[in-house]
């Protein structure tokens, strides 16, 4: 898997004690040497260089680059935390569940009331290009669970020679300083169990994963309340007004991206429609639609006030306008057009999910949830 080189920065604090004493002595002598004694200063600097070079080579062997690998296949997942299940003076490393090539654990190893999530990645099974990792699965699952109102960012904080019995601060990370290491959204056991059908389908179904990843990218560029978009205006908690004129120039590029990504989400499942004046192509599209989702293509898409199939064609027209600027802003791009595209994609995603997901018990079994975590 070639994705560039990710090396652990040299750690000056990583010297073995005896060599660190020698390094400190050299530096102390160099600080106190007279300005006239240039040769002695150069000799000391050369000794320092040799010591640091030797230590750098030693660390390169101890901490090989580009995790996951034999010495670095555990990672703390940043962006999410959970509540401790043990007393503060008790450490536990609890098997939780399995996602693809990753085993997920809860690590009760902090000084407060939170625990962290750690994964063990089977690096021998990583595909050549990428794998649908837990971080992306959690980001998508959380977004779907909140109707894309809230999003989180998760990442891998790689740990060398991981030891669950050591405090977090005493483990050796790829990047020793990470201010996001112990911050994030609290997600408890029930969240993962409740949404296990989503996670299982994301792992099992490439089409669903691509749909959701594109829709998440769309909402990351343009956010609004999905629930309110489907609610009569007099009952809306969050009105989805047009953007004020002084923000339009900043908003248009983001709305363009949101429209393109929402269309890509739909396209993942339904493909690209052909010309609607050719009946053979229209029939083929209708058949494909019915095979993928359970929405009647002739029913009304309420946000746009027209049949779903008709809006399906309109969506690609909106995408074409958003994707090709031709040297000027398409000022006709509006928030309403963007919301229509995103809500349409949202309905397709949710319907696809409901049509293809396993039952809760089946999904839990597939993901190998630890039912005795509290024992």
Image (tube, grey):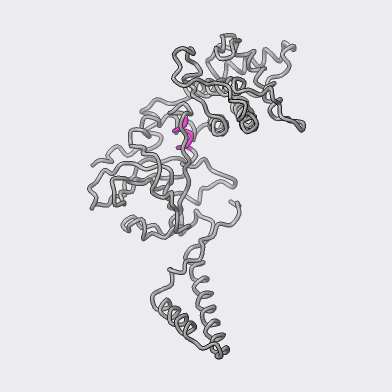
Q: Is residue 236 above or below residue 91?
A: above
Q: Residue furthest right?
A: 326
Residue 161 location, x and y as percent? Answer: 41, 60
| Residue visible at 60% across and 51% down in the picture | 3
Q: Quadrant of residue 371?
A: top left
Count of numbered badges drawn on the protein: 0
| Residue visible at 49% across and 56% down in the picture | 69
| Magenta span | 137-143
Q: Quadrant of residue 310?
A: top right
- Whether residue 153 is in magenta: the answer is no
Figure quadrant of the C terminus: top left
Is 90 left, or right, of 141 in this rendering? left
- Whether residue 139 is in magenta: the answer is yes
Q: Quadrant of residue 242?
A: top right
Is 44 left, or right, of 324 in this rendering? left
| Residue visible at 46% across and 20% down in the picture | 227
Residue 359 location, x and y as percent? Answer: 40, 25
Q: Residue furthest front?
A: 246
User: Which is more toward the observer, 262 or 32?
Assistant: 32
Q: Is residue 80 above or below residue 348?
A: below
- Residue 120 visible to the viewer: no
Residue 15 location, x and y as percent? Answer: 43, 72
- Residue 137 visible to the viewer: yes
User: Which is more toward the observer, 67 or 357?
Assistant: 67
User: Which is more toward the observer, 298 or 53?
Assistant: 53
Magenta residues, dominant SS class = helix
Residue 358 location, x and y as percent? Answer: 43, 26
């Amino acid at each position: 898997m070639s994705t560039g080189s990710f090396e652990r920065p040299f750690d000056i604090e990583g010297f073995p004690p005896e060599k660190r004493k020698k390094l400190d002595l050299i530096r102390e002598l160099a600080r106190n040497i007279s300005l006239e004694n240039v040769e002695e200063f150069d000799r000391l600097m050369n000794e320092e260089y040799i010591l640091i070079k030797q230590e750098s080579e030693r660390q390169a062997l101890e901490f090989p680059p580009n995790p996951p690998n034999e010495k670095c296949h555990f990672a703390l997942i940043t962006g999410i935390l959970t509540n401790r299940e043990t007393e503060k003076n008790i450490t536990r490393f609890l098997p939780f569940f399995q996602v693809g090539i990753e085993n997920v654990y809860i690590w009760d190893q902090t000084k407060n009331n939170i625990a962290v999530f750690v994964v063990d990645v089977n690096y021998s099974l990583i595909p050549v290009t990428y794998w649908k990792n837990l971080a992306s699965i959690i980001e998508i699952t959380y977004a779907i669970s909140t109707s894309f109102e809230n999003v989180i960012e998760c990442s891998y904080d790689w740990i060398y020679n991981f030891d669950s019995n050591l405090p977090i601060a005493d483990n050796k990370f790829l990047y020793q300083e990470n201010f996001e290491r112990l911050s994030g959204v609290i997600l408890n056991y029930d969240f993962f169990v409740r949404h296990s059908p989503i996670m299982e389908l994301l792992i099992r179904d490439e089409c669903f994963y691509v749909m959701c990843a594109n829709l998440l990218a769309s909402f990351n560029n343009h956010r609004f309340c999905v629930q309110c978009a489907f609610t009569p205006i007099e009952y809306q908690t969050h009105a989805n007004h047009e953007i004020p004129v002084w923000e339009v120039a900043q908003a248009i590029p983001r709305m363009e991206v949101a429209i393109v990504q929402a269309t890509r989400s739909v396209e993942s499942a339904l493909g690209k429609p052909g010309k609607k004046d050719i009946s053979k192509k229209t029939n083929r599209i209708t058949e494909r639609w019915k095979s993928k989702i359970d929405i009647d293509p002739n029913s009304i898409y309420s946000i746009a006030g027209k049949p779903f199939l008709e809006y399906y064609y309109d969506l690609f027209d909106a995408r074409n306008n958003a994707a090709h600027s031709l040297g000027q802003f398409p000022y006709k791009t509006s928030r309403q057009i963007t919301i229509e595209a995103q809500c349409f994609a949202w309905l397709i995603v949710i319907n696809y999910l409901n049509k293809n997901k396993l039952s809760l018990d089946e999904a839990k079994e597939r993901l190998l949830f630890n039912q005795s975590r509290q024992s």
